[in-house]
Image (tube, rainbow, N blue to C red):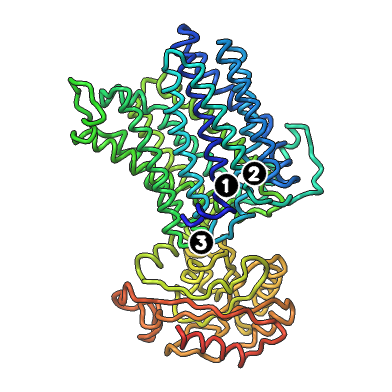
Amino acid sequence: MKLMTERRFAPYFLTQFLGAFNDNVFKNALVILLTYKIVSDQSSILVNLAAVVFILPFFLLSPLAGQIADKFEKSGLIRRIKWIEIGIMLLGVIGIYLNSIPWLMGVLFIMGAQSAFFGPIKYSILPQHLSREELMGGNALVEGGTFLAILLGTILGGVLAGFEHYALPVSIAIVTFSILGLASSYLIPKAQAEAPDLKIDYNPVRSGMKIFSALKSNQSNFYTVFGISWFWFFGATFLTQIPNFSRDYLNGNPYVATLLMAMFSIGIGLGSLLSSKLSRGRVELGLVPIGALGLTIFGAWLGLMDFPVASDTTTVTAMFTQWFTLKALLALVLLAVSGGLFIVPLYAWLQSNTPKNYLSRNIAANNILNALFMVIAGIFAIVCFSLGNTIQSLFVITALLNAVVGLFIFNRVPEFTLQLSAWLLTHSLYRVGKKDLHHIPKEGAALLACNHVSFVDPMVIGALSPRPIRFVMYHKIYNLPVAHWLFKNAGAIPIATHKEDPDLLNKAYDDIATALENGELVCIFPEGGLTPDGTLQQLKPGIERILNRTPVPVVPLALSGLWGTWFSRIKGKAMKGWPRNWMKKIDLIAAQPLAAEEVNLDMLATHIDTLRTEA
């Protein structure tokens, strides 16, 4: 929440909040006007047409929008977009007074175009103003704020459009909020162009194919975007059914449907903030499987509940006094909390795992796929209902599909499973402390050197590191059944002794050099094996060979507290007998990076041993 008091975030947050809020004031006011005021027949067709008209520009203009966001300074782009928003709202005012459906549909299309251009900037500007450690918190606030803006805008739009003389209050609202958004945009700090030399391709098909081709070249980013788009499919499926679910199953009045929408938005906000708190300042992909599990469990729970036939209309007050309505409310909130846990790490990972000069185009590809999945969600619901399924059946089917999609994504991107294991280890089995990990470089190559105490050392270090790490691993452990798939896909580098396999040893050094040359973090345990007595063993000369070939900074690390646990060799053999020392306090501490030319084995051993003593 500290970010909300800082200029590098607060004006941007307010600008995007007011934009989302104003969009939904106008869109819902238009839906109410089409349904009750301007036209009464064929209103359902026009309402669905309005949804298509708004989303169509995302398919047509997102590739161009992504290129522009990468090529030009972003705060200036935001201000231009907000000026255009004022013009759009003035056109909307004219349409409201004319009661012209074609005019209002045209305005809605232009609004969609404006949103398509703002979308890539909305997420790509965050990594320029926030550190990697702040991305989870920043995205949590943005996601929670967006859902709150959608809810409040929808409510206000419906209220204002319900007035007998609706034109003036709706007009004042949409113009006023667009002006406020413009004013806040002038306080956003500059965010330099990341690809100023980019040559813009104005062909939407060709440029769209290019950005998707680039996205697919990075498997983890592609499936991250796939996961984000699936979330919007899932959310659109459930949210669209809430009014009818309220009426048909809870016998609720219109205010009950609004309450359910409100609780869903609040749940997303709570889940988003919870994801930030649980991540402890790192991009925590381990929360995504937890969120996915919650979406399946609570979505299916809502779909399998028994609801008695209510003789009286359910009011907002009655929602909190009847067990069956309380259950529905609880399931919906927990579903939304799970959604927050699912979506925030995905956005943070996409931002942190994409080259800065290409981030806006990746976001543009994400927006296209999001729009496509939301359209498919509508078609999917129609098909399910045409086959005789009920709303609850649709919920169960979607929840089960979520489990299938989740397993598919986690199989394709092992980082999710690995980080979940590491997160569970460091949040449930031990009490973990960290100190001075800011010494680990936020970008660029570095070699991490740590004492080796237990078989879970890589998981602990990986769980606490602000960046992904390539671990150098003894080949027999690397090739263990089942674990081999995880280690391989996590980028671990298997190594053997010269006596065991000289070719594998040489390949390991080649892989380490390549990783460092690519700007990655590589972690080695220079003792060459687990300590047999808890003390630091003599360091092996392999680290000197690495640095002679690829001189990079060396960050000494030390683990403390894992000696004596079930995963250490305190009884001669690790993982022997019953597990012990759960919830023991363990610590990871880092020292300032050492220049490659300064490092020798004795000096590095002294640094690591000093850290052990300090820890």
**Label 3 CA crowd tier, 10 Å (few <14, some 14–19, many 20+):** many
Disc number placed over residue 127 in the picture, else none: none
Q: Callout 3, which amino acid?
A: Arg
Disc number placed over residue 186 in the picture, else none: 2
Q: Quadrant of the C terminus?
A: bottom left
Residue 218: where, in percent of width, then height?
A: 65, 51
Tag 1 residue? 11
Tag 3 residue? 282
Query: Is 314 above or below relative to 195?
Result: above
Q: Is the Cβ of the residue at disc 2 closer than 8 Å to that at disc 1? A: yes
State the residue at coordinates (52%, 14%): 46
Q: How many numbered callouts?
A: 3
State the residue at coordinates (50%, 71%): 461
Residue 314 in the figure: left or right of residue 427: left
Residue 393: where, in percent of width, then height?
A: 34, 29
Q: Callout 2, which amino acid?
A: Tyr
* N-term-proximal mark, 3 vs 2: 2
Residue 584: where, in percent of width, then height?
A: 34, 76
Q: CA distance from mark 3 to mark 2?
A: 30 Å
Q: Nearer the viewer, residue 353 or 300?
A: 353
Q: Nearer the viewer, residue 588 or 304?
A: 588
Query: Is 490 above or below relative to 227?
Result: below
Query: Is 25 above or below relative to 49?
Result: below
Q: CA distance from mark 3 to mark 1?
A: 24 Å
